[in-house]
Image (cartoon, rainbow, N blue to C red):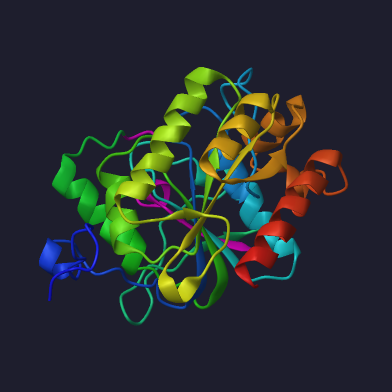
Amino acid sequence: GLPLSNAPPQLPRRQRGLPEKRSIRDVQKVIAVSSAKGGVGKSTIAGMTCTQTSKTHTNLMYDPVNLALAFARRGLRSGILDTDIFGPSIPTLLNLSGEPRLSQNNQLLPLSNYGIKSMSMGYLVDEKAPVVWRGLMVMKAIQQLLHEVDWGGLDILVMDLPPGTGDTQLTITQQVKLDGAVIVSTPQDIALKDAVKGISMFNKVDVRVGHTIVPPQGDIKFTVTHIFGSEGVVRECANHGIDFLGDIPLHASICNDADRGKPTVVAEPESERARTFMSIAEGLSKTLGI
């Protein structure tokens, strides 16, 4: 029948030419960490917890790792998936190397350190070899990372997205059932403009920005975090109805810890910085119901 309002009828995804969203096997909850811009500390946060880093450092790339580590310290079975094909950083941040073994089902087995499991293109290619691939090969690699890894049962998987709003991000948001997303940004306008584009991208692929997570309806909770100043990020959070997670204080040891493959949550678990990551992880855990 005709729609009761002026809104067009919503056809099933397959009829609109879109793939069906799938859960990642043996993973209860999946969070995507994105910035839509490089160099703001997204990877650093994903590894520790969802927060933001300072623009005065160009090497702050370890936050997703700290996020995953903070979840693990809370007693959760935690993992991190590095979806950056061209510039994977998770192997360095976790001090891991070597090619993953295969399971009996011909699935990749994650590498582990500090109590979390991880998978990255950095484990599959030589550290010094550039990945010079066209789109089809990149998409094939993404599919393998998404659906051909034997996680062995996780409570939470932190997905570290590469910068930008291109094929990789679209593939992930259109094919994976996400339970939450975190936008990482510094407070400068030049970084915030790209962060807002990231939010818009999620909206365009039917990932709703909301205050709460309602998994049965597939709703996604988006949060924005930062570490060097907060006015710009807080303002944009309010403008978009997004929860502000918190500030990560700028400290040289965060960069130093990451460079030596021992993220702050592990290297300095009692520091103010680590406590901030733990606080953010606690808040996200409550929101996700884990």
* In the depicted structure, whether residue 155 falls above or below residue 231: below
Identified at 54% across, 65% down, the residue is: 213
Instruction: Look at the image and give the residue range highlighted in magenta.
Output: 115-129
Residue 37, given in percent of the width and then of the height, sits at 44, 30
> Is residue 251 or residue 118 the one in the foreground?
251
**Farthest residue, direction bottom:** 104
> Is residue 280 in the magenta section?
no
The reply to whether residue 78 is visible in this rendering is yes
Snapshot quadrant of residue 216:
bottom left
Seen at 20% across and 39% down, the residue is 133
Taking the magenta stretch, the answer to whether it contains residue 125 is: yes
In this image, 195 relative to 258: left or right? left
- Residue 286 placed where, x, y %? 69, 66
Looking at this rendering, what residue extends furthest in the right direction?
A: 270
Q: Nearer the viewer, residue 202 or 74?
A: 202
Q: Quadrant of the C terminus?
A: bottom right
In this image, 141 relative to 96: left or right?
A: left
